[in-house]
Image: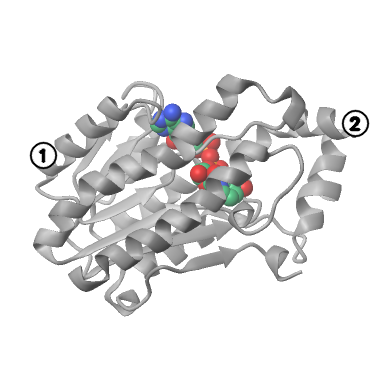
């Protein structure tokens, strides 16, 4: 049922985004993949997605830049023919006490994690409405439901994404479009690996202690969520079976937010 549809997936050259691009391509979807760096820098990720035989385009659009986002969406419509599925997944993190939080980091996190989704959604919705079909998925986080210290900007954007998701769901419900967010707990990806050092510094503990006493301590399963598990949930949300699911926030967090 997804075969021949076209998807834009932001931040899909690594981690969770790459896993969802891989899974949707395996289901027959043509993919506009996106991430920082050049096409050559992202060759391995592009080849991984393309091995399923569907069309794969790469956009280096920086989610900090509304003009580049607009160019990416326009190119996807023109070259693929439509944007039927949109996954807003690009995201960054910075860990710091609020009184030391660098202003430019705050601005960048708001722009990449939240404002970029506003831009892609506002540009994708007209075509989806015309075609009376669409799937929008926002990668939120357990931090869309609960907070952790030293992550003020990230937690703010993820709570914001959950609100944006509900609003868009209501505005598009009569047009065959669904909009949901998926909220993973800790998934072992470069984003998580890169925050080990700063979290250790902010909390005054070792990096191993961050892994076991901070990250996995939040998750009753004591296991990292896998990128494949997140991709399977998102693929289901793109299916016809999920046509009545909209405006919802799906936790996939090993029980973290049940506590
Ligand atoms: P990752 O670092 O592995 O991948 C991030 C992707 O975003 C890469 O493709 C990168 O190139 C891209 N990206 C970063 N900045 C960008 C920019 N300015 N413009 C365009 N692309 C940009 O990260 P990940 O862990 O896979 O995270 C993906 C999403 O999942 C993020 O929104 C993150 O907040 C969310 N998330 C991650 C976890 C986790 O534990 N890893 C948990 C909950 C939510």
Residue at (57%, 53%) from the top-left corner? Answer: 141
Q: Which residue carries the number 1 mark?
A: 79
The C terminus lies in quadrant = bottom right
Residue at (76%, 49%) from the top-left corner? Answer: 215
Whether disc 1's CB lies below 8 Å from ligand 1 is answered no
Residue at (62%, 50%) from the top-left corner? Answer: 187
Instruction: Tell me the CA gap for discs 2 and 1.
Output: 50 Å
Q: Position of residue 216 (x, y in %)?
A: 77, 54
Q: Is residue 73 left or right of residue 13?
A: left
Note whether residue 230 is visible. yes
Q: How many numbered circles are shown?
A: 2
In the rendered image, which quarter is residue 220 located in? bottom right
Note whether residue 8 is visible. no
Whether disc 2's CB lies below 8 Å from ligand 1 is answered no
Q: Position of residue 144 (x, y in %)?
A: 58, 55
Which residue is more in the foreground, 69 or 232? Answer: 69
Which residue is more in the foreground, 43 or 209? Answer: 209
Q: Which residue carries the number 2 mark?
A: 204
Pointer 2 local density, CA inside 10 Å: few below 14, some 14–19, many at least 20? few
Residue at (38%, 75%) from the top-left corner? Answer: 245
Q: Secondary structure at mark 1?
A: helix
Reading the chain from its start, which is encountered first: label 2 or label 1? 1
């Amino acid at each position: 049922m997804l075969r021949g549809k076209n998807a834009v997936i932001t931040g899909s050259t690594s981690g969770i985004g790459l896993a969802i691009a891989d899974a949707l391509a395996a289901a027959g979807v043509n993919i506009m993949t996106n991430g920082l760096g050049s096409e050559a820098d992202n060759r391995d990720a592009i080849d991984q997605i393309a091995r399923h035989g569907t069309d794969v385009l790469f956009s280096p659009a920086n989610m900090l830049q509304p003009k580049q986002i607009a160019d990416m969406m326009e190119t996807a419509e023109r070259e693929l023919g439509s944007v039927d599925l949109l996954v807003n997944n690009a995201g960054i993190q910075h860990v710091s006490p609020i009184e030391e939080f660098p202003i430019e980091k705050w601005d960048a996190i708001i722009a990449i994690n939240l404002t970029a989704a506003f831009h892609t959604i506002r540009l994708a919705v007209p075509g989806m409405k015309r075609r009376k079909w669409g799937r929008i998925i926002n990668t939120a986080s357990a931090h869309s439901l609960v907070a952790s210290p030293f992550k003020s900007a990230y937690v703010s954007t993820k709570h914001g994404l959950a609100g944006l998701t509900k609003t868009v769901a209501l505005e598009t419900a009569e047009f065959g479009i669904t909009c949901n967010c998926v909220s993973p707990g800790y998934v072992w990806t470069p984003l998580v690996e890169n925050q080990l050092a700063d979290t250790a510094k902010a909390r005054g503990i070792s990096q191993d202690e961050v892994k076991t006493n901070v990250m996995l301590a939040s998750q009753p399963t004591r296991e990292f969520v896998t990128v494949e598990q997140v991709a399977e949930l998102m693929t289901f949300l793109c299916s016809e079976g999920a046509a009545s699911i909209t405006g919802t926030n799906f936790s996939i967090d090993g029980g973290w937010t049940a506590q």
